[in-house]
Amino acid sequence: MSRIPKTESTHPKPRPKPPRHDPFDGALLVDKPTGLTSHDVVARIRHHFKLKKVGHGGTLDPMATGLLILLLGRGTKTSDLLINSDKTYEGTLRLGEVTDSQDSDGEITERRDTDLVTREHIEAEMKKLEGDLMQTPPMLSAIKKDGVPLYKLARKGQVVERKPRLVHLFDFQLVDYKEPNAEFRLRCTKGTYVRTLCADVGDALGCGGHLARLRRTESGRFHVDDAAPLADLLDMSLEELGKRVIPIHRITESAQSLS
């Protein structure tokens, strides 16, 4: 018995549907207030607006303010693009006071005299750090050792060996100095611990120091001038919030323009 040959269907196969556009797929620029962790900001936006998926494109320490990029919906898939981008900060190095955390959130462990420190001395030490730099992460950091964040070990009084990491400082500039506060501007690669830089400058000057204030002004092509304070965002309607979301294609275009 002969088989009847199969005939190909004349009906074209249905084309896959393009991904549905969602106004909440993208990035949201937040001007983070001091005293909150980046996770706190993520949680408040997610819970207040009942959004399913919210992440971030690079953390800020609780004491820091400024540009925090939140990622919504499918925008969370672009997190590596934003985390890997260069950052710009403005801050205050307070000389003469050493803290156990290298910033103003810690306890002062030592006070030293700053009378002999000049603007020229500070500028020289900042310039020495520009370029490639092997930086040892502080114990009070979120880096994990055997699955445990270093800051948890530090709170138990433990100190473990940390591997130095390569970072790059494009520009470390003294803006103003009124004893004991040195105002600075810094542009650097991802993963740079600014508080450690401040502690290093203080040590080099012989008087010690810590990071008293930090504000992130830029991350890649995004600027804090285009961000909204968290309190203002929480006062918006869902529709108003949606108008502030940067679509995914603009995130990728921004990253490609920097590569």
Image (cartoon, rainbow, N blue to C red):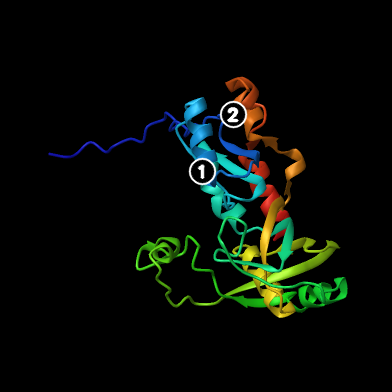
The image quadrant that residue 182 belongs to is bottom right
Residue 28 vs residue 105, the one in the foreground? 105
Q: Residue at x 55, y 55 (%)?
A: 80
Residue 175 % position (x, y): 85, 61
Q: Position of residue 176 (x, y in %)?
A: 86, 61
Measuring 48% from the left and 33% from the top, which residue is drawn there? 15
Q: Which residue is mark 2?
A: 23
Label 1 sits on residue: 55
- Name the residue at the left extreme: 1
Question: What residue is at 59 percent from the left and 52 percent from the top?
Answer: 60
Q: Residue at x 56, y 59 (%)?
A: 106
Relative to 76, does residue 95 appear above or below in the rendering?
Answer: below
Q: Along the line of sight, which residue is nearer the eye, 114 or 136?
A: 114
Callout 1: SS = strand
Residue 105 is at least partly visible in this image: yes
Q: CA distance from mark 1 to mark 2?
A: 16 Å
Q: Foreground mark, 1 or 2? A: 1
The amino acid type of the residue labelled 2 equals Pro
Specify which label sits upstream in the sequence, 1 or 2. Answer: 2
Look at the image and tell me in which quarter the C terminus lies. Answer: bottom right
| CB-based contact (under 8 Å), mark 1 and mark 2 | no
